[in-house]
Structures are given as C-alpha cells and as structure tokens.
Image: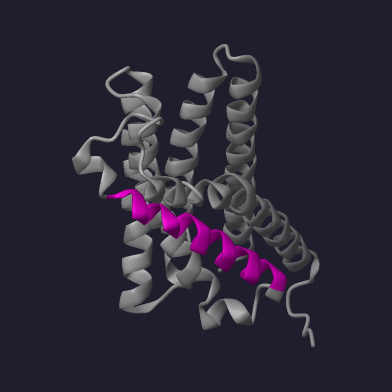
Amino acid sequence: MDEARVRDTGRLALATGLVTAGSAVCLGTYFAVGGPFGTINDVGNTATGVMSGVLAWRMRRQVPGRVGAAAVGAAVVGGAITVAGSSLVVSGTTGFLFAGLVSSVGFAGIGAWLIVLNRSRDREAVWPGTLRTVGVVAGALMALGILTVPGIPLGLDDMETAPAWVWIGFVSWLGTYVVYPAWAIALGVFETRRASATRSVPAGTVTG
C-alpha cells in the first residue's frame, strides 16, 4: 500500500471514529434533554454504517482469501442494513426498538469484519498489538447484535415487553458506540502517522 493510500485510509478511519462517537453523544443527549438529537443520532448511525462499509472495501486487500472476502462482504451488507434500520425510525415507519434490532444486525456484520481484519496475520507485522486487541473486542461486542435477528420477523417494537435476549443483543451497542470509535480513531492516527513517516524517508534510503 503506497503512502497516499495509507494516509487516505487513515483519514477515513479517523472520520468514521469521530462520526460514530458523535452519534453516541447525540443519543445520550437525546435521552437527557430530548429535542432533535434522536434524529441526529439516527443520521449518524447511517453515516457510520456507510463509512464503515467503504472502509472495509478500501481495506479489502488486507484480508485476503475467501474468509477475508466474506468478511468484507458482511461489512458492506451490514452497512446497508444500518441505513435501512435508521430509515425505518426516521421515516416513522417503525419505533425505536424495531429499528434498533435491524441496525444491530447491520453492525454485527461490520463487527465480523473487524474480527477477521484484526486477527489477520498480515496485520500482525504492521499494527500494534493493542490496536488489534481493541479491534477484536469491538468486533466481538458488535457481533452480539446477531442475537436480535429473531426479533425482526416477530415484529418486536415495544421496550416494555421485549424479551431478555433482545437486551443481551443490544449489548452490541457498547461495541458500536464505545470500543469501535476508539479503535477507528486509533487506527486513523496510526495510519496517518505511518504515511507521514514513509513520506519523510528519502527515496532509495534503506531502513532497518
């Protein structure tokens, strides 16, 4: 991967992390004071899903093989599903809970990609161990969103009567809103610095 591509990937990762963190803040603000912050959160979730899908596609060469291709596909499809989930609640088609079920499944696909990416042997030689560990933890938490799948055909949309397994699946949002943005921001900083270091080394210089 050349310097420009590393830099641009880093910037995309950083932007994804910041947007995701901002979306989380908006959700907390909505529960505290109400207002338009709920809708802003939904728009932020959409942006996070789209940007994550683009990031996965951009980094597709870093997870080679069939497993890697499947993981990238899961992230891209997952990003599209998050858009559908947010659209449901923004349009008033469904309530917050049902839309959350759909979005949780979408982010689970992104989580699966995170696990595969950060466990790739190709990344062991490039990324710090802490960065990869945070990525795996984020992915594992986000992947719990797959537990919400049964709630979609059941049409669950009432927080008061939602079964316990729905809330277990919603633990995935800790990964989406807390650990994932931390990983994305850290990746963005690391990659942009790596690109700068590469640019600062004169052509033909041999490094140890």
- Please say which color scheme the image uses: one colour
Q: Residue at x 31, y 67 (%)?
A: 70
Q: Main secondary structure of the magenta part?
A: helix
Asked if one can make out residue 82 in the rendered structure from this viewpoint, the answer is yes
Left or right, residue 42 beside residue 68: right
Q: Is residue 37 magenta?
A: no
Measured along the vertical axis of the image, is residue 82 above or below residue 58? above
Q: Residue at x 45, y 52 (%)?
A: 168
Measured along the vertical axis of the image, is residue 4 above or below residue 11? below
Q: Residue at x 50, y 40 (%)?
A: 48
Quadrant where the image shows the N terminus: bottom right
**Near-viewer residue (140 or 132):** 140
Residue 104, image x, y percentages: 40, 45
**Near-viewer residue (122 or 118):** 118
Q: Which residue lies most toward the left here? A: 153
Number of numbered discs on residues: 0
Q: Is residue 142 magenta?
A: yes
Left or right, residue 45 beside residue 208: left
Residue 166, image x, y percentages: 39, 46
Residue 126, image x, y percentages: 65, 76
Q: Which residues are magenta?
A: 130-149
